Amino acid sequence: MAVPEHRVPLLPLTGFVTFTTLDLSFLRVKWGGNGGWTWEVSLMIVSDSLSRGVTKVAESTPSLFGKSRTRGGAAARPTSLAFQGRRRPGAAAVGGTPGVESPSCPRRPRRPSETLRPLPSPNTLVPGPPAGTRLAATPEGGGSGSGGAAARSGPPVAEGFGDEEGGRVRAAREPQGAPASAEMMAEEEGPPVELRQRKKPKSSENKESAKGEKISDIPIPERAPKHVLFQRFAKIFIGCLAAVTSGMMYALYLSAYHERKFWFSNRQELEREITFQGDSAIYYSYYKDMLKAPSFERGVYELTHNNKTVSLKTINAVQQMSLYPELIASVLYQATGSKEIIEPVYFYIGIVFGLQGIYVTALFVTSWLMSGTWLAGMLTVAWFIINRVDTTRIEYSIPLRENWALPYFACQIAALTGYLKSNLNTYGERFCYLLMSASTYTFMMMWEYSHYLLFLQAISLFLLDIFSVEQSDKVYEVYKIYIFSLFLGYLLQFENPALLVSPLLSLVAALMLAKCLQLNVKKGSFVAKIIKVINFYLVCTLTITLNIIMKMFVPHKENGHMLKFLEVKFGLNMTKNFTMNWLLCQESLQAPSQDFFLRLTQSSLLPFYILVLIICFLSMLQVIFRRINGKSLKETVTLEDGRIGERPEIIYHVIHTILLGSLAMVIEGLKYIWIPYVCMLAAFGVCSPELWMTLFKWLRLRTVHPILLFFPRLMTELMELQEFYDPDTVELMTWIKRQAPVAAVFAGSPQLMGAIKLCTGWMVTSLPLYNDDDLLKRNENIYQIYSKRSAEDIYKILTSYKANYLIVEDAICNEVGPIRGCRVKDLLDIANGHMVCEEGDKLTYSKYGRFCHEVKINYSPYVNYFTRVYWNRSYFVYKINTVISFQS
C-alpha cells in the first residue's frame, strides 16, 4: 500500500516541506531547500488522530520511539516526538535537539528581537498576517535531561498541510502537565505564515476521524510496577503453598487418626479386614481379587462375569458396583512396583486418604477464587475438619463410592467457579474448561449416583442462565461437557441404561432444543421477558417428556426402588414392604436431628452460613429486579459498589447450596455433600470484603472490620487412644476358613455376608447393596430367619438359594432399638401381618415362635432341618441338612 505523501512549498523561501502519514500514530515531516539540504523528523501522536488535526507533543527518550504503541492504536503515556535526522553530506544543518549539542549544527543564540508568545488554546483559530509573509520557525523545548527532543522546524505539525488548497489549521493541543518550555513558542525570522481554515472534510474522512477518536478514548491499563507484581506473585505462591499443605496435612491427619482408632499396624491381616464393614468389605474384596488375578485382563473378565460372589447369580460387578476405583488402584499397585514396599491394604487406604486431601484442597481453592484471599481457604479447611462428623464418612467406611467420587466433584466445582468468573483471561478459561471436562467424566465413572448430583448442578446453571447474570455461551459449554461425559460413560460402563434414562440427559437435551428454538430479541424488552417465561416452561415440559419417552424405549431396572422410597418418604404412598420400611428406618435416610443443628451452631458454622446466604440471596434478588426493570448491569463491579449479586459464580453457588440444603433437610445422608460447601460458602463470606461492603452499603455504614479467629484443637483427638476389639467375628472367620468346605454357601444378614466374602472368599446368598431389585428381594427373604415363620418355610427359602450354612446373629435376634417399629424383627412382623401397624389393619396370629429363638432350643422340627456346628457369644452357625431326618 502506497504511503500518502503531501508536499507543501515554503514561500517566499526556496524550500519545501513534505508530510508523510505513516498511520494514525506516526507522522514523518521532511523539509529542505533547493540548496541541497534536507532534514527528516518522525513524530508519534499519542492521543488524537491526524484526521482531527490535533496532536499531543510531550517529552520522551529517543529509545522509546517505535516501541510505545499499545492496544487499540493509542498510547498509554504522552510519549511522542522522537527524531531521526538525515542530512546530505556538506549541507548545513538547520535543526537540532535542545540540550544536546550537535557537532554538525551548533546551537544558535537567540536574537534580542525574537520574542516568545504562548501557544493558542485548543480548537482556536489563529488569525494570520497578510499573504506573502515568511513562515515562523518554532523551536520546541526539550524538557528534563536527555528525555526531551525537538527540532527547529517549520509550522506545528497538523493535518491540513496535506490539503492542496492550504488554509488555516487548528492549533495543536498540549498534553496536560507538559513542561513550560513546550508551551512557549518563539518567532524566528519574520512574522508567521498566514493561516486559513481548511475545507470541510468528506464523509469518509469523518468516519476515519470518528474511528480514530474512539480508539484514542479507550482506557489502556498501565503496567503494574515491579513491587506490585512481586506482591501478586508472593500472594499466589503463598496461597498455593497453603492449599497444598492443607490437603497434605489433612491426609496425614486421617492416616494418624485411623491408626489410633484401629491400631492398624499391630493387627493381623484378618483383623484389619474385619474393620471394613458392610458394603466397604465387598469393594475391598474385589480389589484383592484383582491382585490375585494372573493378569489385568483376566481379572477384569472375572469381575465382569462374576459367579463366585452370589449363589445362583452371575453379575457384572464392574458395572453394578462401579468398581473402577478398585481397577485403577490394582493397576497402580502393580505398575509402580509397590508390592515389595507397601502392603496392599495400606496402598488402598492411602489412595483414599490422598483423595480426601485433594478434596480439601479443591474446597480451599474454590473459596479462594470466590473471596480473593487464601485466608478464606484456610477457614474452609478449619471448618471442614471441625465438623468432619457431618462432612465425611471416611472415618467409618473408607472404600465407599462417595469417598472416591466427591473429591473429583469438588475439583469440578472449583474449575466451574473459575470458568464462570467474568474477568478470566483466555488461558485461564481454557484451563478451567479442560479441568472441568476431565473431573466431570471421572466423577461420573466413580459413583453410580453421580448423574443425580450433576442434574442438580445443571438446574443451578439453568436458573443462572434464566436470570441473565452470565453469558449463556459459557453455560451451554458446560452442557456439552455433560453430554460428552454421559455418552462416554455409557460406552465404558458396558452400555449402562441408567445413564440414558437419567434426568440429566433429558434436561440437557431439552435445553439444547430450547436454545435452537429461541429467538433473538433485544434484551430487557417486554418481548424478551415473555420469551424467558416461555423458554422456562418449554424446558420443563421437554425434560419430562423426553425422560418418559426414554424410559418407554430403553429397557431398564435401575433405581425403581428409589422412586418407591421417595413416594413413601413424602407420604404419597403407604406400604408394609419390609425393604421400604427398613430403608425409611435407616438413620442416614431420615430427617436431620436436633443434634445435627446443635453441632453446626456450636462450631459457629451455621450462623455465619445463614448470614452469608441471606446477604447473597438478597443481593441476587436485587440484581434480578434491576434486570426486570430494564436496568443494565455494570461491566466491572468494584468493591465500593457493594453488588456481590452481580457475580455469576456467587449466584451459582447460592442456588446450588439452596438445592442441596433442601434435600439435606429431608434426607440426612445428603449432609455429607451439602456441609462441605456450607463450609466453603461461609468462609468466603467471612473473608470477602465485597460481601461485607454489600451489607454496609445497605446499612449506610462506612467501615466495619469483621474478624473471626478460630483454631481447631486436633492434637487432643490424636492423643486419645481407641481400640477396635471384635474377637467373636475373628473366631467366626477363622472357623470358616478352617472347617467349612470351599464350595460352601453361607446365608445371613447382608452386612455379615460382606465381611465373610472379604475375609474368607466363600460364596454368600446376599450382599449389602441397595441398587439392585433382585439383591433387595434376596435380603428380605434371608431376613426371614428373624421372623415368626416355621422351620419348613425357612428351610425352603434357604435351599432355594443353595445355601449350606446359616448364621444367626444374637445382636439382631435380641435387638432392643431406641425406636419401636424400626427393629428388623418389628419390620418383618409388620410385613408378615403379625403386628398392627395402623388402625384398621388386620392382625394375623402366628402359631410359630420367632425362628432365631426357637432354633437355639434344639427340638423338633428345627433339629430336623438344621444342625448347629459352631457358636460363640455373638454368632450361631447351623448346617442346613440335605437329608431331612424327622425325630420325635
Image (tube, rainbow, N blue to C red):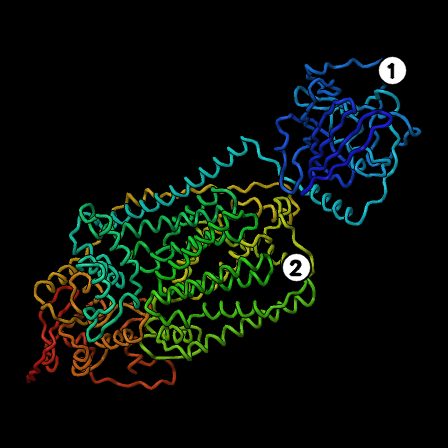
Cα–Cα gap, marks 2 and 1? 69 Å
From the top left corner, tell me how far across and down residue 662 is, in percent: 48, 64
Discs 2, 1 touching: Cβ within 8 Å: no
- Residue at the spot x=54%, y=33% of the render? 228
From the top left corner, tell me how far across and down residue 661 is, in percent: 47, 61
Q: Nearest the camera: 33 or 420?
A: 33
Image quarter of the C terminus: bottom left
Amino acid on which disc 1 is placed: Ser
Above or below, 373 relative to 514 = above
- Residue at the spot x=17%, y=50% of the render? 267
Specify the quadrant of the image occupied by residue 69: top right
In screen coordinates, is 126 left or right of 354? Answer: right
- Residue at the spot x=45%, y=67% of the render? 504
Q: Residue beneath label 1, please?
A: 113
- The answer to whether residue 206 is seen in the rendering is yes
Q: Element type at marker 2?
A: helix
Q: Residues within 10 Å of mark 1 (few under 14, many from 20)?
A: few
Specify the quadrant of the image occupied by residue 590: bottom left
Q: Nearest the camera: 757 or 307?
A: 307
Q: Nearest the camera: 799 or 449?
A: 449
Above or below, 820 relative to 469 = below
Above or below, 302 relative to 554 = above
Q: Residue beneath label 2, please?
A: 627
Q: Element type at marker 1?
A: loop
- Residue at the spot x=42%, y=66% of the render? 452
Amino acid on which disc 2 is placed: Arg
- The answer to whether residue 814 is seen in the rendering is no
Above or below, 442 relative to 496 = above
In screen coordinates, is 150 left or right of 515? Answer: right
User: Who comes first in sequence, dot 2 or dot 1?
Assistant: 1
In screen coordinates, is 345 left or right of 435? Answer: left
Q: Residues within 10 Å of mark 2 (few under 14, many from 20)?
A: some
